Image: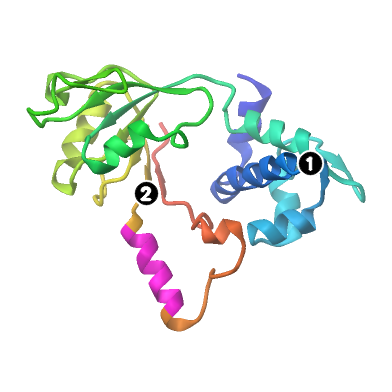
Amino acid sequence: MSSALNRQNQLSEPTIARLPVYQRIAQEMLRRGTTKTDSKRLGELAGVTPATVRRDLSGLGPLGTRGSGYDVQTLEVQIDEALGHNRHYDVVIVGLGNLGRALVGSTNFLIRGAQIIGLYDIDPSLVGTTLNNIPVLDPREGIMNATIGVICTPAEAAQAAADALVGANIHAILNFSPRVLDVPVGTAVRYVDFSIELQILAYHLTNGTGPLGGGLLRTLGLTTPPVVARPS
């Protein structure tokens, strides 16, 4: 197992959730020609304290020296390695309604190293067609093995989709459906529910509290990642 994966296993879930935000900040800094930064500036942009930034990044290995800040290019590369973006991931999507089709056509959905290899839907008008040159198949006839399964079905069909993915030996699921899934031990599920995020924003608007204006991290709703992980 690589040192990057060893480091990743030692990171907490909140830290893992913040790493992509730090990486996005670093990428924007590089685009603007900034080559050095510090925990204070990273914290301001991410909406966390400098101490949190230093603690989060300490698990990635040496990124700078005390008092001189971080080399932005090194920071971006180290986070990329820690998150596994230098590996290969096959992705299948189940459910090709408006959201599923949007994800297939999006240029920002997939991380580097990931590719969509399978599309599934039970709608007879879709089965047998192609999207982005990928055939649409019926999940009831079996799902090809992949690294990650994405569920974009209506709520009532989400559990069946999860069962089909697990049956294909896929144990990493990204669920956009508003349904809590029952999955076996060894399967990790991450939930993306836009309605919940809107409810949280509505609460803060109503009460004048919370993350509004509080930095990129909190604006993205990543302070408490909705993860259910059932390690084997």
Disc 2 versus disc 1: distance between alpha carbons?
A: 33 Å
Q: Is residue 158 left or right of residue 189?
A: left
Q: Is residue 59 left or right of residue 178?
A: right
Can residue 184 be seen from the camera position used here?
no
x, y percent for residue 33: 79, 41
| Residue 164, above or below 227 | above
Can residue 1 be seen from the camera position used here?
yes
Looking at the picture, tell me which residue is in the foreground, 49 or 37: 37
For label 1, the residue is 33
Q: Residue at x 7, y 27 (%)?
A: 124
Looking at the picture, tell me which residue is in the foreground, 191 or 44: 44
User: How dense is the environment of label 1, judged by Cα within 10 Å: few (below 14), some, or many (20 and up)?
Assistant: few
**Magenta span covers which residues?**
195-205
Q: Residue at x 81, y 36 (%)?
A: 62
Mark 2 or 1, closer to the camera: 1
x, y percent for residue 35: 82, 40
Q: Which mark is residue 192?
A: 2
| Residue 173, above or below 15 | above
N-terminal of the pair, mark 2 or mark 1, is: 1
Q: Magenta stretch: residue 203 in it? A: yes
Residue type for callout 2: Val
Quadrant housing the C terminus: top left
Q: Residue at x 52, y 78 (%)?
A: 209
User: How dense is the environment of label 2, judged by Cα within 10 Å: few (below 14), some, or many (20 and up)?
Assistant: some
x, y percent for residue 42: 73, 53
Q: Residue at x 66, y 61 (%)?
A: 48
